Amino acid sequence: MKMRTFLFLAIVVLAGTGGDLAVTHAMKQIGEVKSFSPRALLGVMWRALKSSWIWLGIALMTVAFFALLAVLSWAPVSFVVPATAANYVVGAMGARFLLKERVSQTRWAGLLLVTAGVVLVCAAR
Amino acid sequence: MPSSRNLLAKTIPLLILVPVFGSLGNVLLGKGMRGMGKIPDLSIPSLAAYLLKILSSGWIWLGIGSLLIFFVSYMLVLSWADYSYVMPITAIGYVLAPLLAHIFLGEVVPGKRWAGAVFIFLGVAVVGRTPPSTTGPV
């Protein structure tokens, strides 16, 4: 694998999961949504738009999106897309160490099954 | 924290909306963009005209609407559920796509893809057995 491909894949995975983790953190700060009335939902969205974590998350997701477009312009889709399944493992580590979620052995087992499945689904031609 | 039954009653519907509207949005955007042709050149007027053409497509707006529903559902479920719970479970979208393509479009789905779908299905079932939320409010 070319150095440049590896670097851009790393950006896709790290910025993508970083974006998800930032959005999760913002929503945990806003707190559990209990009412789903339109008025309550608008209130939640308004609070979310005022959170800098949400904007950090959106910025990181944007970086991941353009890095993915870039790497797809030279590396084969059949390699790039299955490789982004690394998101599941990196995301779970971020959830464990940054968000302090309790990732039990059962959850790890499920995560690894999902990761293997995504690689297989995306690699199949 | 509410009882786990209450929590699942609102977690499950959102966990269905996320992959459904996420993949629907991508398909609609793809359908909209397919009719656009290539970008003529990189001058400001032709880029502006191209953007206007994209924004006048109904498919594009349906796609944007779907992705908006996807993102709001994702944010709502993450307000109480673990990221390490939501993220693997929403991978069920990878199972839905070949299944729907097979049933409705009669597409031949390669064996490797079915095998992957089975792995994902089992993984989602295993993660689904863990409690959705293991952290309190921040």
Image (cartoon, grey):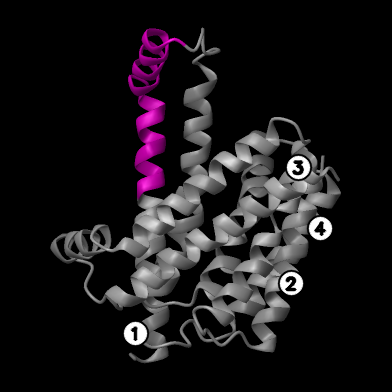
Label of residue B71 in the image: none
Label of residue A4 in the image: 3
Does mark 1 fall on the same chain as mark 3?
A: no
Read off the residue under disc 1: B137
Residue at 68% in and 66% down? B121
User: Which amino acid does the dot numbered 3 rest on?
Assistant: Arg
Q: Residues within 10 Å of mark 3 (few under 14, many from 20)?
A: few
User: Which amino acid does the dot numbered 4 rest on?
Assistant: Ala
Does mark 1 fall on the same chain as mark 4?
A: yes
Residue at 60% in and 42% down? A67
Question: What is the spatial separation of the Cα atoms under label 2 and label 3, in whole angstroms?
Answer: 27 Å
User: Which amino acid does the dot numbered 2 rest on?
Assistant: Leu
User: Do residues under tags 2 and 4 come within 8 Å of each other at their CB atoms?
Assistant: no
Q: Which residues are magenta?
A: B43-68
Q: Check the image and report above or below for A10 versus B3.
A: above
Read off the residue under disc 4: B115
User: Which amino acid does the dot numbered 1 rest on?
Assistant: Pro
Mark 3 vs mark 4, foreground winner is 3
Q: Quadrant of the N terminus of chain A?
A: top right
Q: Residues within 10 Å of mark 2 (few under 14, many from 20)?
A: some
Mark 4 vs mark 1, foreground winner is 1
Q: Position of residue B12 (x, y in %)?
A: 44, 71
Does mark 4 fall on the same chain as mark 2?
A: no
Q: Is residue B93 visible?
A: yes
Label of residue A112 in the image: 2
The secondary structure type at the circle numbered 4 is: helix
Provide the chain ID for the residue under circle 3: A
